[in-house]
Image: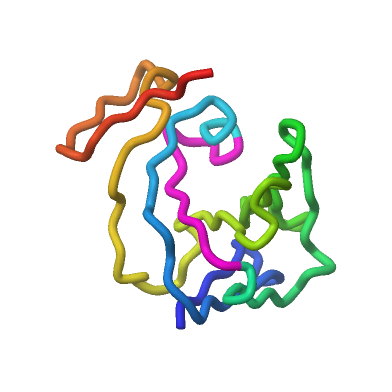
Amino acid sequence: MIIGSCLCGGVHYAIDGELGPVAVCHCGMCRKASGSAFAANASVARAAFHLTGEALVQRYESSPGHWRCFCRVCGSPLFGEVAGMPDHVRIRLGLLDDDPGVRPQYHWAVNFKAPWWRIADDLPQLELTS
């Protein structure tokens, strides 16, 4: 079981399944949503994602068919939903309370990375194309 929670503790989730590949995303939206140089994300089957504190979850449609979900009390970015993938959610690994047992597998959207950040590992670096 993988457990996660927001900063204020009002929203918790438990995952009783496997995480998909972990991506370190450098796109402008992930940077702005996380307030950092990147966001570490992974997909999980919605059926394996158990949420408590649903009343505190606010959804923001950042682009057509893509919702960023966050805690309306503390602002923690919780997970993402995509209309084209209704059976999955994309979690933010920064909210995990324990070691999920997986590590990032690649950097995504490196052509949009923060100019002040230097990638210093050997993971594959993929560009975002239109």
User: Quadrant of the rendered structure where residue 54 is?
Assistant: bottom right
Q: Is 82 left, or right, of 90 in this rendering?
A: right
In the rendered image of this protein, does residue 8 appear above or below residue 81? Answer: below
Colour mapping? rainbow
- Which x, y percent locates residue 48? 57, 76
Residue lying at the far front in this picture: please name it.
84
Horizontally, is 107 left or right of 122 in the view? right
| Identity of the residue drawn at 30% across and 41% down | 106
In the image, residue 44 lies in the stretch drawn in magenta: yes
Q: Residue at x 52, y 32 (%)?
A: 31
- Measured from the top left, where is residue 38 in percent x and y? 43, 36
The image quarter containing residue 109 is top left
Nearer-the-camera pick, 21 or 122: 21
- View extreme (left): residue: 122
Residue at left 63%, top 75%?
Answer: 47
Residue 32 occupies quadrant: top right
Residue appearing at x 38%, y 23% in the figure = 127
Q: Is residue 105 magenta?
A: no
Left or right: 73 as drawn, with respect to 117: right
List x then y, in percent, for residue 61.
77, 39
x and y percentages locating residue 97 in the rendered image: 45, 72
Viewport quadrant of the C terminus: top right
Magenta extent: 33-45
